[in-house]
Amino acid sequence: MSAAAERRTDASAAGAAPDAGLVAELEVERGGFRLDAAVAVGPDEVLAVLGPNGSGKSTLLAAIAGHVPVDRGEVRVGGRLLGGAGAGEVPLAARRIGLLGQQALLFPHLSALENVAFGPRAQGAGRRDARAEAAGWLERVGLAGFERRRPAELSGGQQQRVALARTLAARPAALLLDEPFAALDVEAAAGMRRLVREHRAALGIPMLLVTHDPLDALVLAGRAAILQAGRIVDEGPIARVLGHPRTPFIAALAGVDLVEGVALDAATVRSDGGLVLRAAEPAGLVTGAPASAVFAPGSVHVRAADAGAPAGGAAAAGEPSANHWSGTVASLEPTGGGVRIVTAEQPGVAVDVPTAAAVALDLEAGAALAFRIEPADVSVRPLG
Amino acid sequence: MTRVVHAPRGGIAVAGRFPGWLYLPAGLGAAVLLLPLAALLVRLDWAGVPAAITSPEALQALGLSLATASWATLACIVLGVPLALVIARSGRGTAAALRTLVTLPLVLPPLVGGIALLSLLGRTGLFGEVLAVWGIRIPFTTAAVVIAQVFVALPFLVISVEGALRTAGTRFEGVAAGLGAGRFTVFRRITLPLVAPGLLAGAVLCFARALGEFGATALFAGNAAGTTRTMPLAIYTAFNGAGVSEDTAIALSLMLIAVAIAVLVLMRGWRADAPR
């Protein structure tokens, strides 16, 4: 246990800065790609970094972990300067940053127990203490009884849980998760997510979760940062960043429709494309000022255009009625459990219908459809 | 215990069918390899075999061969693993240059190796004169046998281990360092175990090559019974030797073949239950 005590003093030794979290300001250039990002994660916080493939998410984590050299900037954990241009790089072994990636990367020649015991052993614990500690971690990730298994004898989900145990057993000062659920099947991913969630509070260390799946962010993180082409384009509480995205790009990532336009009144937005959306809750929009409306593609009601009265019969001539529009199908593509419709008239607006409804509508390109959305399903806010 | 997928055993899969006439060159290839050895067995005077292979000279040569080949293999491991590591971890250009240099002894006739070793360590060689001042004489000693064997066998180990290192990559080493392991711990607990199968295969090849080494040994170490006359030299001596029958040479050859087969079989046994 002396090793653990030593680690603790080590962590607080250089602590001039009061900030106990993870602070990274980095510039990294690699083969034409440039990452220029700053993140700050509190000691008990989980920050989700969302972005598409190639946006620099993994580079960001690799640079913080010390696997990729940093051109400018610095990384601090608990006030301890770990690396950056100029400052002498702290060797990888002394950084104490846990990194869990898409692949478990368990040492193939060691048993599950020895894999988990590796960190404590490398940090000076005796063989017996390290094994006892490792057994405890395996139990905590639900793998008691799997101690002697080789990685090749474990399922993908089990391997990833051993990897989590191995990372945590090394007592990291910060934890970086690089799409740790992406390579798992749905069930294993759910189990793994639950596990990280369970340990999140108890660990009390800053956690950075990189993902392209908004679900990960919703389940695990309090704040989200959006990384696009090497830069952070938005950052804030999950509910704000994903619930009402700032840009069409983030909206696409979050899987919602974002319509930008001008406010007609405190609760209504008219898009440049002629769409009028009214929210049930007024959001203090200023008439004539830029505003945006957001809704889920699945909350839109769809019917064939020629069935029944024209949409919004009460509307004034020439003015489309709020929350009603029509269009002809331009493209159809499958989503999980349904079909996504994009119309020629509103190319920026996706509408999802369940498979059964799609069959009933006899969907095909060129079909004329009428759309309607409840005001309760629309949220509006001023732009800018 | 379940293991990772094995290739289907027994017969060639339907998808892997090839033109039937290819059996002809394949059979000829096998004949080229095996017929000479078969001829050896046919020619052998079996009655004389026990006496030939239990003669003090034969046993002495065998003992010397096994001992020197073992020392040479050990030296190859101690020197070759670090060399392989340096090559595997250097940049593409440097690695290619180093690999070419290391492979050179493989393509050189061993006789040239013997001459090269003499010009370095011979009495009038580059280092030989300096060593002579210290009273150290290397040529025509058992040490010279080992050095000659290392010279010809080292490339096998380096190539084998370097390949294993490249296959293993550096990802596991990065993970280990991230868990707090220093460089030596990473080398000892991750790098070495990961390349163990390659190291073993390399060591076996090394040993086999050292066991069969003749040319460099003959020039650099000579042919003194008891100190430098290894099995190949004993066979050569018996074959050319005055008074000794050619049958002795054949019997000794058979012995060397048996040892080589034993080594290869042993390796197969080890590799079957090697980790991963």
Image (spheres, helix red, strand yellow):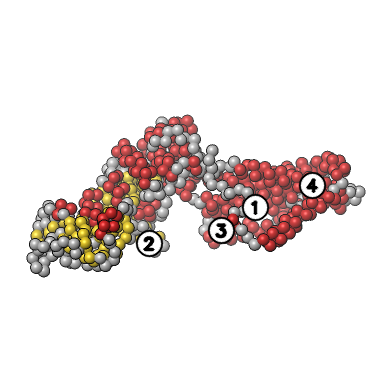
Mark 1 and mark 4 lie on one chain; the one further toward the N terminus is 1
Element on which disc 4 rests = helix
Q: Judge from the rendering whether residue A263 lies leftward or rightward of residue B112; answer left or right.
A: left
Q: What x and y, as percent, mark residue B229?
A: 80, 47
Which chain contains the residue that carries disc 3?
A: B
Do tag 2 and tag 4 residues touch (Cβ < 8 Å)? Answer: no
Q: What x and y, as percent, mark residue B64?
A: 76, 43
Q: Judge from the rendering whether residue A35 lies leftward or rightward of residue B256; answer left or right.
A: left
Residue type pointed to by label 2: Phe
Q: Which mark is residue B95?
A: 3
Residue found at the far bottom of this picture: A318
Task: Compare residues A231 and B114 and report the one nearer the observer.
Answer: A231
How far apart marks 2 and 4 lie (CA) works out to: 64 Å
Residue type pointed to by label 3: Ala
Q: What x and y, as percent, mark residue A154?
A: 46, 41
Do tag 4 and tag 3 residues touch (Cβ < 8 Å)? Answer: no
Task: Compare residues B156 and A162 and report the one nearer the observer.
Answer: A162
How far apart marks 1 and 3 lie (CA) works out to: 16 Å
Q: Nearer the viewer, mark 3 or mark 2?
A: 2
How far apart marks 1 and 4 lie (CA) works out to: 24 Å
Q: Which mark is residue B254?
A: 4
Q: Which residue is mark 2?
A: A33
How far apart marks 4 and 3 lie (CA) works out to: 40 Å
The residue positioned 29% from the left and 38% from the top of the image is: A201
Q: Residues within 10 Å of mark 3 (few under 14, many from 20)?
A: some
Element on which disc 3 rests = helix
The residue positioned 20% from the left and 56% from the top of the image is: A301
Residue B271 is drawn in which quadrant?
Answer: top right
How far apart marks 3 and 2 lie (CA) works out to: 27 Å
Q: Which mark is residue B156?
A: 1
Residue type pointed to by label 1: Phe
Residue type pointed to by label 4: Leu
